[in-house]
Amino acid sequence: MSTDSKKTITAGLLAYGMSGKVFHAPFLDTHEGFSLKAVVERSKKNAINDYPQITSYNSVDELLNDEEIELVIVNTPNNLHYEHSKAALQKGKNILVEKPFTATSAQAKELYKLADEVNKQIIFYQNRRWDSDFTSVKKVLASGKLGKLNEMHLRYDRYRNVIGPKAFKEQAIEASGLIYDLGPHLLDQVISIFGKPLNYHKILGKNRVGTAVDDYFSIQLTYPDSIFVFVTSSMLVVNPQAAFVLHGVNGSFIKQRADIQEEQLLAGMKLNDEGYGVELNGNEGILTTIDAEGNKTKEVIPSELGSYLPLFDAAYLALNHEKPYPVTREDIITQLEILES
């Protein structure tokens, strides 16, 4: 692999729906280490309006046969991730794969083996590690102000009481349901801090009328030193709870889900626009600590700037300089073992 710091990696997107338009194309286009050459659009040809220089292919095979493309972004429906990742690796491409990486840990291990055989890399797209709200949680933990942590809650709630149009999310097929939609985000955040749990207990629920898949899940994860982590998501929450609640010996930290990047990108904001990634006022976290005399102190914790560009920085360094990528193969296996259990 070249160590030329100026090398540009030519990339291709397998889909240009919301994921491609919001989470991938703007970053590939902005990051100087990448060049977005092509996308797959089976029917509507929208990408050229945003990126006039690109090629729009009609099929995955056409893009995979493009010899100039070095990195394939697998952002197709969940149940196709394994198939498309395997096909891309067999064509000698590096891959960056949306969550969930695959439906099962067995599929993941097979792709790991294939990647090693063809000497290509797998980059796992777990962008929520770089959310402004989550980075503020890590900042508080690193400060030590909470003391010994004993309990942490993570929630990701929505209110969607009707069955959605996306078959890969709503039909009882591989890697469907809320657990595979939002579970990878929450579990990866937990695993990025604490690693593999000692044990866990998972609950799934079906609450919407006519649903074929789970629309509620809750997972309790146990870690050494009596640290208990609770991960919850529901599609029927009218008033969302705090997204992050942490309790330690010396205090508590409460934080709303407040990263604004997705909303801004959907509205057409560019990465270099003023205010990009800046949380709205009033969404700051609140750290409450208590001293030996029982006196409480409240501290407002402003968030860092939200940006997914560091993910692409890490991907570039992994692909071009063989630097370890922060989301590891072991992290993904731990996540998938919980999801598939």
Image: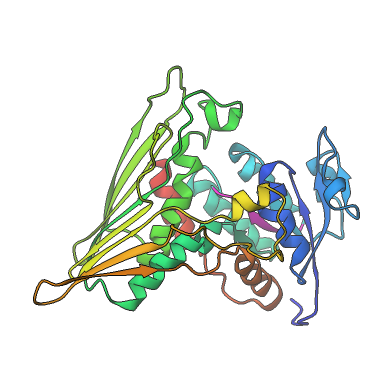
**How many callouts does the rendering have?**
0
Task: Left or right? Give the position of 87 relative to 215.
Answer: right
Task: Left or right? Give the position of 69 relative to 243.
Answer: right
Q: Which image quadrant: the N terminus?
A: bottom right
Q: Which image quadrant: the C terminus?
A: top left
Identify the residue at horizontal 68%, vertical 78% (top origin).
Answer: 321
Q: Is residue 179 above or below residue 163?
A: below
Q: Colour scheme used in the picture?
A: rainbow
Is residue 278 covered in magenta? no
Which residue is the extreme one toward the front?
281
Region in magenta:
92-99
Identify the residue at horizontal 78%, vertical 82% (top origin).
Answer: 4
Percent from the top left, x then y, of residue 334?
A: 41, 55
Which residue is the extreme one toward the top?
210
Identify the residue at horizontal 53%, vertical 28% (top origin).
Answer: 170
Which residue is the extreme one toward the left?
293
Percent from the top left, x then y, of residue 203?
A: 31, 37
Is residue 96 covered in magenta? yes
Q: Is residue 277 visible?
A: yes
Question: 113 or 285: nearer the eye?
Answer: 285
In which quadrant of the rendered view does residue 302 lie? bottom left
Percent from the top left, x then y, of residue 241?
A: 35, 45
Percent from the top left, x then y, of residue 80?
A: 64, 39
Q: Is residue 57 above or below residue 206?
A: below
In which quadrant of the rendered view does residue 122 lie? bottom right
Q: Is residue 72 visible?
A: no
Task: Left or right? Give the position of 157 relative to 280.
Answer: left
In which quadrant of the rendered view does residue 30 lie? bottom right
Question: 102 or 295: nearer the eye?
Answer: 295
